[in-house]
Amino acid sequence: MLNNVELIINPVAGNGKTARLQDQLIEQLQPNCLTLHTQHTQYPGHAQELASQLTDAADTIVVVFGGDGTLHEVVNGLHQAHLELPVGYIPTGTGNDFARAHGISQKPLIALNQLLTAQATATAIGLVSDPKLGEIVFINNLGIGIDANIVYQTNHSKIKGLLNKLKLGNMSYAANLLKAIRHQQPFQLTWQARKDHQLDHAYLCVFTNHPYFGGGVQLLSDRQNAQAGIHLVMVEKTTWRKLIPVIGSIYAGRSLNHNIHTADHDTFHLLVNSPQHIQIDGEEAMAPVNATIKQINQTFLLPVS
């Protein structure tokens, strides 16, 4: 039996999947809660506002019906308001990398059953601090370069809405991968962990909490993921002949390539002076940045392994 549940629903997540399933999910959740208070998001950023307005009651948990973007907003709202509430997640989005990384079923009804027996678990998530961006928490990853360019191209595609209505959103992503590859230029980045490093022709730079990004692409091997701290994955642009196979191997889930550079540390400092697209859990931002990136703990209700 769950205690007092604050349920935040994004009805448009998953191209309307949440709206189709919400009545069935609520019907199964209701008898297993002492109290259930439901709120629906109405616009981008609304989930963050709703979460920030909750009270820090000891017997309250937050449950999210939506995608990774909705979960990102809720966790940021809690962080912004200094609320230490456990969060449960029923993934109804299209990417669901957080669920994939933490053993939560991609099938919402099964995920709901997992939630009912889940264990409160302190989970490492990312925190980026930058004078321009402020403080932003990320549950999955932060990327600069080609992956962020893909997010930008996809979000601003003229046919995105049509493809989503036709349930062909993955085609939009694939088409914009090719467009982003054509447009992305190499850039200079400086990063510091144990010592200073500089990459003069960076093409991809991802800070990640777990192996997955881009809706199921496995960025890290199991051995790499076992290392503590934030994981940094970088690709440097040399020649197109060398670069295309590297990008292809990443998006095919085969990231063990000698042209893919990785590092692990508890805290990174990052400097990018040129204007570059940034994605933070799929949300858009722009460099220049002079940021500190580290991990903090957030309690999630996760399946018992």
Image: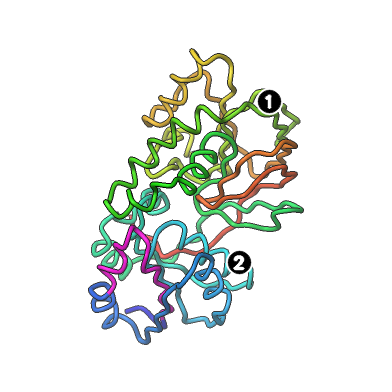
Q: Residues within 10 Å of mark 1 (few under 14, many from 20)?
A: some
Left or right placement of residue 272 versus residue 223 in this view: right
Residue at image position (34%, 64%) is: 90
User: Could you tell me residue 36's position as x and y percent?
Assistant: 37, 84
Vertically, is 15 above or below 219?
Answer: below
Residue drawn where x is 55% and y is 33% of the image: 233
- Would you say residue 15 sits in the magenta stretch? yes
Q: Secondary structure at mark 2?
A: helix
Q: Tag 2: residue type?
A: His
Q: Quadrant of residue 26?
A: bottom left
Disc marking residue 199:
1
| Image disc number at residue 79 | 2
How many numbered tags mark residues here? 2
Residue drawn 41% across and 71% down? 63
* Nearer-N-terminus badge (1/2): 2
Is 271 situated above or below 21? Answer: above
Which residue of the protein is positioned furthest toward the bottom in this rendering?
35
For the point 57% across and 59% down, which residue is it? 297
Residue closest to the eye, 43 or 237 = 43
Q: Which residues are magenta?
A: 5-22
Work out which quarter of the rendered image holds the N terminus and state it. bottom left
Residue 285 image point, x, y percent: 62, 49
